[in-house]
Image (cartoon, rainbow, N blue to C red):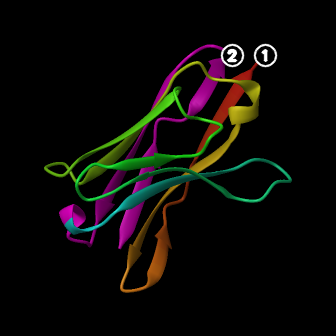
Amino acid sequence: VQLQASGGGLAQAGGSLRLSCAASGIIFANNAMGWYRQAPGKQREMVAIVRIRDSTTYADSVKGRFTASRDNAKNTVYLQMNSLKPEDTGVYLCTVVVSGRNYWGQGTLVTVSS
């Protein structure tokens, strides 16, 4: 299983970024995909989960600002991040659970300046 996240970068507060995570080695359409983030000195936290029928769950801190989606034809999950805040800064990672094991991508860094 391989997960390749991209799309991170530097954004100003109030700006937007769109992250992508391409998956291989799995039957993508059969798996829920997750976005997590880890800020410096903080624990990793769930940002969004996209299930196989596109239902989503969001952390309270990003509700109304972030939108997670998936394209099964491209084996890719997305995270559209709007109205970014400095506290959104961190490494964003995508994950999938296969046969009870968590697989993680390498992450993409998002930095939001005030």
- The vertical placement of 22 against 19, above or below, is below
Label 2 sits on what residue type?
A: Ala
- Dot 2 falls on a residue whose secondary structure is loop
Residue contact between numbered discs 1 and 2, judged by CB atoms under 8 Å: yes
- Image position of 56 with respect to 64: above or below: below
Left or right, 27 with respect to 56, comes to left
Decide: is 32 above or below 80: below
Q: Is residue 47 magenta?
A: no
- Which percent across, then down, holds residue 34? 45, 57
Camera-side residue of 94 and 32: 32
The segment highlighted magenta reads: 1-29
* Residue farthest along the bottom direction in this orientation: 99
In the image, 68 versus 109, the foreground residue is 68
Q: Which image quarter holds the C terminus? A: top right
Separation of disc 1 and disc 2 at Cα?
5 Å
Tell me the residue that label 1 is attached to: 114
Give the residue type at disc 1: Ser
Side (left or right) of 62 relative to 113: left
State left or right for residue 38 relative to residue 33: right
Identify the residue shown where x is 41% and y is 74%: 97
- Say which residue appears at 49% left-offset and 61% top-offset: 105
Mark 2 — residue? 13
Percent position of residue 64, x then y: 51, 27
Q: Is residue 8 left or right of residue 53?
A: right
Residue positioned 35% across, 74% down in the render: 1
Give coordinates of residue 9: x percent, y percent: 59, 30
The residue lying at 52 percent from left, 22 percent from top is 82
Q: Pick whichever of labels 1 and 2 is earlier in the sequence.
A: 2
SS at circle 1:
loop
